[in-house]
Amino acid sequence: MKPAEHATAKRTQQLLSEAGLAGSVVEFEQPTRTSAEAAAAIGCSVAEIAKSIVFRGKESGLAVLVVASGDNRVCERKVAALVGEKLGRADADFVRAATGYAIGGVAPLGHAQPLRLLLDRDLLRFTRVWAAGGTPYSVFPLTPAELAAITTADWQDIRQD
C-alpha cells in the first residue's frame, strides 16, 4: 500500500479533502477491481468493501450507481423499483462516460455526469468501509455516515434475497 500517485486517484483524494474527509486514497501493486481483490489487498472482509455497480436506465439512459456491500448481490428488480424504470447493462464505455472512472475503480463521488445513486443499507453494519479510489488499484476508507454525506444518497434495501 502506498499513497495515491495516479492522476485520477489524486483527483479523488482532492474531492475527499474538499468534502472534509480525513481518509486517504491509497494504491496497491495488485488490482483492487473486485470486492475479493480489494479485501485481500486491504486485509478486511469482502463485506466491508463498498463496491460500485453501474446500471443504465432503459428509458432515461441515465446511469444508476449502486454502492453495495461487497458480499451482496444487487437485486436489479429492487433497484429498478427504487429508480422508477427498468435497468439495462452498462458497458465499459458507458461507465467511463457517465462516471469518469473505469470499471473496477468507480468512486462514489466526482462523477462526470449526473446520475442516480443508491446506498446498500447493509453497509451500515460496519464502522469503516473501503470504496474505490478512482482506479482499479486504489481505495479509501470512510465511515457509512461519511459515505452518505459525500453522496447525499439514501440507504436502501438492494440486496438480492
Image (spheres, rainbow, N blue to C red):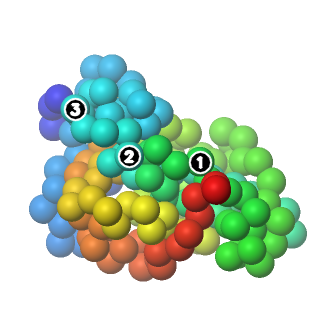
Q: Amino acid at mark 3?
A: Gly
In primary-sequence order, the first of circles 3 and 1 is 3
Question: Where is residue 51 shown, x and y percent of the image?
Answer: 46, 48
Q: Secondary structure beneath disc 2?
A: helix
Report the side of 31 relative to 6 (left or right): right
Residue farthest to the top, as pictured: 30
To which residue does mark 3 refer? 43
Report the side of 135 relative to 117 (left or right): left
Is residue 4 visible in this depiction of the protein?
no
Q: Amino acid at mark 1?
A: Arg
To which residue does mark 2 refer? 47
Above or below, comparing residue 61 to residue 48 in the picture: below
Q: CA distance from mark 2 to mark 1?
A: 11 Å
Q: For the point 23% across and 52% down, which residue is it?
A: 141
Q: Secondary structure beneath disc 1?
A: loop
Q: How many marks?
A: 3
Quadrant including the C terminus: bottom right
In primary-sequence order, the first of circles 2 and 1 is 2
Within 10 Å of disc 1 (Cα), the crowding (few <14, some 14-19, many 20+) is few
Quadrant including the N terminus: top left
Q: Amino acid at mark 2?
A: Ala
Question: Where is residue 124 shown, x and y percent of the image?
Answer: 34, 67
Above or below, comparing residue 135 to residue 119 in the picture: above
Kindly indicate the quadrant of the structure image that contains residue 7: top left
Q: CA distance from mark 2 to mark 3?
A: 12 Å
To which residue does mark 1 refer? 73
Front residue (pair 75, 105): 75
Within 10 Å of disc 3 (Cα), the crowding (few <14, some 14-19, many 20+) is few
